[in-house]
Amino acid sequence: MSPSLSAQNLTTLGGLLLVLAILVPFAGMLIGFVFGGGNAQRVALATLAAGLAIAIAIANALAQSGKAVVYILGGWMPPLGVALRADGLSVVMLLTVAVVICGIGVYARADFGTPSGVKEARAPLIFWLLLLAVWGSLNLVFVSGDLFTLYVALELLTFAAVPLVSLDGRTETVRSALRYLLYALLGSVLYLLGAVLLYGAYGTLDIPLLAARVRPEPAAWAALALMIAGLLAKTALFPLHLWLPPAHAGAPAAASAVLSGLVIKGSWFLAMRLWFDVFADVVTLPAAQTLAALGAAAILVGNVVALRQTRLKLLIAYSTVAQIGYLFLMFPLATGLATAGLDSAMAVNGGMLQAISHATAKAAMFMAAGLVYTTLGHDRVADLRGVASALPMTVLAFALAGASLIGLPPSGGFLAKWLLISVAITTAQWWWALVMLVGGLLTSVYVFIVVVRTLAPAHVGWNPKTTVPRYQQAAVLALALCSFLLGAAVLCPVDVTQIGRTVSRNTVLP
Amino acid sequence: MTLALAVDIGLTLLILAMAAWTIAVRDTFASVIGFVTYGLLLTLVWVRLAAPDVALTEAAMGGGLTGALLIGAAARLRSTESASRTERPSVLTRTLAAVLSAAVTAALAICVLNLPDPAPTLAPAAAAQLGSTGVGNPVTAVLLAYRAMDTLLEAIVVLLALVGVWSLAHDRAWGGYPQLRSHADPDGILAYFARVMAPVGIIVGIYIFWIGADFPGGKFQGATILAAMWLLVIGAGLAHLPPVSQTWLRVLLVAGPLVFIVIGFAGLVTAEAVFAYPNGYAKPLILAIEIALMPTLVLALALLVAGAPQRMPPQ
């Protein structure tokens, strides 16, 4: 075993925090399930605070040591045992998910309170339990260092996410949930087949050990193809996106925010982890170009279809289809940099920033749409007059989140696209830059249409159906601001995402 | 040609035939029966491959539990069966699906046939460390020592699946009783069978669970048998399912994973890491975890078959 490998198999200071990041949300879910009713919500909110503190502590441990945070479970060394590892990429995602989940938790207090006089109601109990389960599963995706544990994480994520789609119990949402379940299960099976092939060929499932052993040969190609295809079905990359719009648009607003902002990032992150950390020596530029071509198709198709939607929530859901496309443009850009002997960090950072800004912006947008629905009693795009005077903070939040999706400065979306476009030009792949510019233009049209419609004055004598609590509006605005101000990440003195990423550095360099 | 080879070839042909039947047959119920038979034949394959642990799991989960779930689903779909038969994918769709499946199968076959021989494996390492876990069955050591966290999370997956099934309940029925479809006569043959069979089945289930520490067997397989016995007694009308709001039910459902987490974190104090066991106490702690997981799994698996609550709770 080489020295760099053995260094990745030692529990580091703060490693225990990784175990807590996974098990605290699940323990909260179990305890909430026993007490039930309004107590489940109380346990969930307490867990949100604890989980946010844990995520911050992990980030601190990473920044202090400048190396990946590692925990060896049970003291059993890989390959026999399982290691948890958090490098810069993991920590950035842990923090993002913690912030977004807390925002959603604050917002959901109004929509998923247990009604007074009832001991326990179905939808609130299920929502709070699944919110915690989604969180624990995502944290596991980000820090697990073992391909089978990652399979368990995908299964947890599927079973936590699918019931969120049909929380309101309408027949058509149950149908969308079932379709989502079928896509997600197919994805899990393909991933598992790939993992089994890898174990059969190389005798380990530990990521660094596997990265050192994997060679460009049929077994590795087949495993890569199966696993990536499965993860694309879960991430809803075009043309496997058909399940997403009805599922994300039909769920209650807080659940849509979880699904569209966070859940799809889990499978995307895993695809990226496999691509850069396991299969770095196996992937080829044409394979990366294929992924990005699907991404480009997603950007164009998703945005055009979003433009034609008459319902606000469906418009936002199709916008997610388009934004997922941007997440896959980084693959040929990173490969292009690596083959030119340059550091691929810039392309990876562009992709990560896109994921973070979309997570915060899309969660804010779906929750804003939920408030619009509560106020108007409908979400028809053609009839949004009066919303801006009733919900000024919410319309501002929608516009800021929209600016991030378009890529206006100083938003996170701007910095992401700026990084990706500059890499596209450096590596002479100008066509991806063109796709991003056209996508931004199309996005700006529908964001503009929605905002302008909300600014129209209300009919005389019109009153909001329900008054929305101020803290709900504040939660939405806070998440939108996170996305809008994320561009300030450019001022960060160290390249946070690249801390502890020895694996890709060793293998990418010629 | 030896007898063993003849058995293997016969088994392979039977499995392929059952798989083709499961896909080709139009009646849902017939297809489910084909699938269950296919699972039982796979069990024999695992026995032939000298993997008795996998064989037991396949028989209990793949054949038994999945079969029960599918038969339940087929029974619920009976009334819409004829309507759904008119919806049939086009020839083009079916051809594309067949081509895609064949291509994936061919690619997998090529890869599997070209895997290194002897296969790289962690089996010797798992066996070498067996002494420090105190258990005699290396599969149990993998599940509860080397990869304990995976097993904990899998138990949580089962619970999440149950929460998902319950989430399909009608708002008015929330907190109420799940109902098995049973039209049993309390003096009929099913009730008689349940009275005779259940005690035997319970002993077999507990035996398979207990023996799992040192020989093939274990909690998942044992729990499936116990769940089946419970459902048999309920289906015969001799007992009722509890309402989903029942506190003891919820406590037992989470007890397994919670005890697992507590013992896992105790390892931080008594041994050197989370999910580590102190020297000499590994086996009793593993047994404690398995005993706590048993009711969780039995209840969760049986309630998965029973479905969402349907009847109002008592006021």
Image (cartoon, coloured by chain):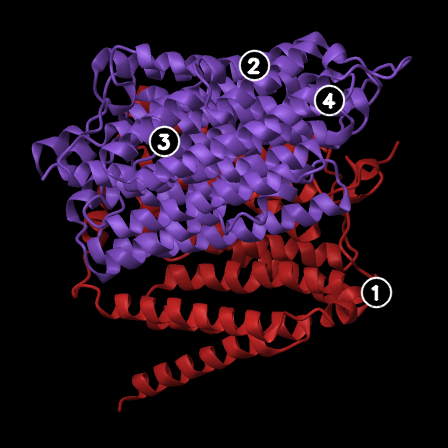
Chain colours: A purple, B red
- Kind of residue indicated by mark 1: Asp
Question: Taking the image as drawn, is residue A19 in sight?
Answer: no
Q: Please provide percent x and percent y for residue A237.
A: 47, 45
Rendered position, A396 above or below B60: above
Q: CA distance from mark 1 to mark 2?
A: 53 Å
Q: Secondary structure at mark 4?
A: helix
Does label 2 or label 4 sit earlier along the sequence?
2
* Front tag of 1 and 2: 2
Q: Secondary structure at mark 2?
A: helix
Q: Residue at x 33, y 44 (%)?
A: A147
Farthest residue, direction bottom: B1
Q: CA distance from mark 1 to mark 3?
A: 68 Å
Quadrant in the picture for the N terminus of chain A: top left
Mark seen at residue A372? 4
Does label 3 or label 2 sit earlier along the sequence?
2
Q: CA distance from mark 2 to mark 4?
A: 28 Å
- Kind of residue indicated by mark 3: Gly
Q: Chain of mark 1?
A: B
Please name the residue that numbered disc 1 is placed on. Answer: B187
